[in-house]
Image (cartoon, rainbow, N blue to C red):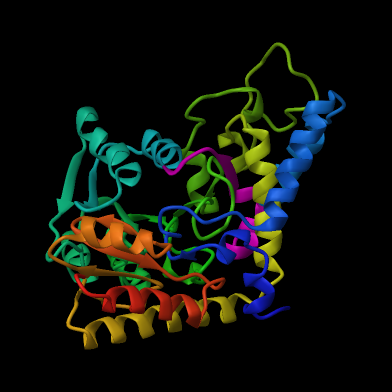
Amino acid sequence: MRTPGPALRSLFPALTQVTYLNTPTAAPAARPVLEAVREAEDAWSSGRFDWLAWERQAEQTRSSFAQIVGGQPEDVALVNSVSEAASTVAAGLPPGRVVVGEREFRSNLFPWLALAERGFEVVEVKASEGVVSTERLCEAITPGTLLAVVTEVQSASGFRVRLPAIGARCHEVGARFFVNLTQSLGALRFDAACGADYVAAHGYKWLLAPRGTTWLWVKPGRLSEIRPLAPGWKSVELPFADFYGGPFAPAAGARRLDASLAWFSWVGARAALDLLASFDAEAIEARCLSLAQSFREAAAQRGFRLAPAEVPSQTAAIHVPDPESLHARLEKRRVIASVRGGSLRLGFHAYNDESDLAAVLEALDAPGR
């Protein structure tokens, strides 16, 4: 098992041209992922492609994702987006009370808000200083709550909640627990002991995969509640045995929830998860957190106001009077970040290093910041 450093960094061509701190938006392409996708494109171009081989590569990611989250492959579904994953879970819920933070990214908000049209009580937990804290979420999870929804690292600010505390509160009141790991998994490790019933993650950020690759893990005891959101040829136990006629008999495991897949994205996803698995996950997390903490300390010393923090996160946001202008000045220096919620947001993956930290700090120190 390798440790991240030059061995990982050298696999990202973009890093020779820019200081890339925008993984919370999307990761740059890693060479093994690019090569896998290009190989598939070349096969497609030749007319001698094997689409079943592409399907098998997608299937391999089911086991890879299960290993990352501490589950079993048969409990993992392959879908296209977090909104699809959330909507799939939402469709199987009995009417009840759902708790979700008001500052959730809309892919993990609108599927739950839409439940109000079906008679659900949907409670949006108010934010303070742009974040929804663990304490506020736990306070809102009262007896009688059906489901609590959280994203471990909040998209706009990098604020990270304490999943074990929320999971414990859900267990205490008998609520289900939906966890979105899109802004953390791949950089931060996940502990299944937090009590999640459902875990979703889109792969195009910290998992280094192409867009359009999302995994949904469902706790075995919850699988019987869920039916396919859009039943199709992939919903049955043996989808490749016959493509025509009925009857419709959903697969026993989470594969019943599978979408029809965009092949090239999943070919890239297989290469991405294989790449991450070749590096030590603990070392990846330590590197990400160390770089982000160093940035926070240096930014604070320079007088920048940081977004609130509760648990160490690999993503940081700083409040500035004119974030768009600062963002433009950073881009001129080839420092790639993003503006969210009136703040400048930066994310540190294990392919980043101290030179990236120095580059962004030098840009922040420049006159006219």
Q: In front here: 240 or 273?
A: 273
Q: Residue at x 51, y 82 (%)?
A: 286
Q: Is residue 242 above or below residue 166?
A: above
User: Magenta span has 178?
Assistant: no
User: Magenta span has 78?
Assistant: yes
> Percent x, y for residue 8?
65, 71
> Percent x, y for residue 268?
67, 47
Q: In front here: 248 or 360?
A: 360
> Percent x, y for residue 97?
21, 46
Which corner quadrant holds the C terminus?
bottom left
Relative to 34, 183 lies left or right:
left
Q: In front here: 167 or 18?
A: 18
Which corner quadrant holds the N terminus?
bottom right
Q: Which stretch did the figure color magenta?
A: 62-82
Q: Is residue 3 above or below residue 233?
A: below
Relative to 285, 58 lies left or right:
right
Q: Residue at x 52, y 78 (%)?
A: 353
Q: Residue furthest front?
A: 367
Relative to 20, 304 lies left or right:
left
> Percent x, y for residue 282?
57, 80
The answer to which quarter of the image holds residue 122 is: top left
Q: Is residue 2 above or below residue 198?
A: below
Q: Is residue 110 visible?
A: yes
Q: Residue at x 51, y 60 (%)?
A: 206
Q: Residue furthest right?
A: 48
